[in-house]
Image (cartoon, rainbow, N blue to C red):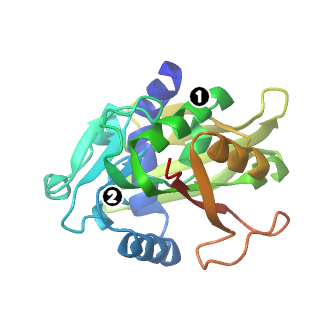
Amino acid sequence: MNSEILLWERYGPLFSLEERDVYPADMKEIQFYLDLRKKYTGKCMELGAGDGRLTELLPDGSLVVALEPSASMLGSWSTELQRGISRVRGIAQQLPLKNSSLDLVLFPYNGIHCILERNERKLAFREIASVLKPGGKFFAEACPGFDKRQDENREDRYDYNRNGTSLKLIESVHNDLKRGLIVFDMEYSGSVVTDGTIEISLELALISAGELLNDIRNEGMGVVTIWGDYDLSPWDADDSPRLLVLAERNEK
């Protein structure tokens, strides 16, 4: 886990620039989370909140907690964004909150794949169930289709240059089935990289839909519904681009 946190200390600022400036906003994604938050109000926590890109949409006059393991990501929050949001450095496997204190916990953007060991993911689900009120909701986003992705070697992803800021990404992708991982080897260059280039190897866990759903159920929660995309289309193992899971803490 320490190595994963250290990786995000290096990768966080680059990821933040990509998500906020390089890639256009996904309005379907944003509307999905706005609708979800509108339906499930009350005390809320986002796991892996990063630089606050999603958390800034969530305040509704109640408590919002942004949990993030990377200090560099938390440090990138603007002063304006910090208002009304409690930023906490921590991990999902050790939630620093009282039991039965939250109405909603979100784990968006494939964040669950960043927890590489299955036993650690089970521990995270157990912790989430403990901090939810009985009947409180948990939402997770995952991509079981990672294992179907074809290997790629040094593909040019983008060459961004705007207002004096430049960033270029060359990326290779391969599945390490023996270790149960998909690996993204990324080479960055540009004005925001001080040493010419920086190489980052991002490992994400391969998680099947069945494994994810079973682990959620076995750690104190029941699955309410699953969708295959932000338009609430039904989950299809062959065609759905993502797996969106809404669960709730068991009453007992």
Report x, y in % for residue 161. Answer: 43, 59
Which structural element holds mark 2? helix
Report x, y in % for residue 146. Answer: 75, 50
Report x, y in % for residue 90. Answer: 36, 32
Q: Which mark is residue 16?
A: none
Sequence-earlier tag: 1 or 2: 2
Name the one closer to the observer, 71 or 142. 142
Amino acid at pointer 1: Glu
Identify the residue at the far top of this view. 2
Q: Residue at x 62, y 77 (%)?
A: 232
Q: Are marks 1 and 2 in contact (CB under 8 Å)?
A: no
Q: Is 114 above or below relative to 241?
A: above
Q: Is 234 above or below relative to 178?
A: below
Q: Which mark is residue 120?
A: 1
Amino acid at pointer 2: Thr
Where is mark 2, residue-wise? 55
Q: Residue at x 35, y 38 (%)?
A: 99
Whether residue 14 is visible to the viewer of this picture, yes or no, is yes
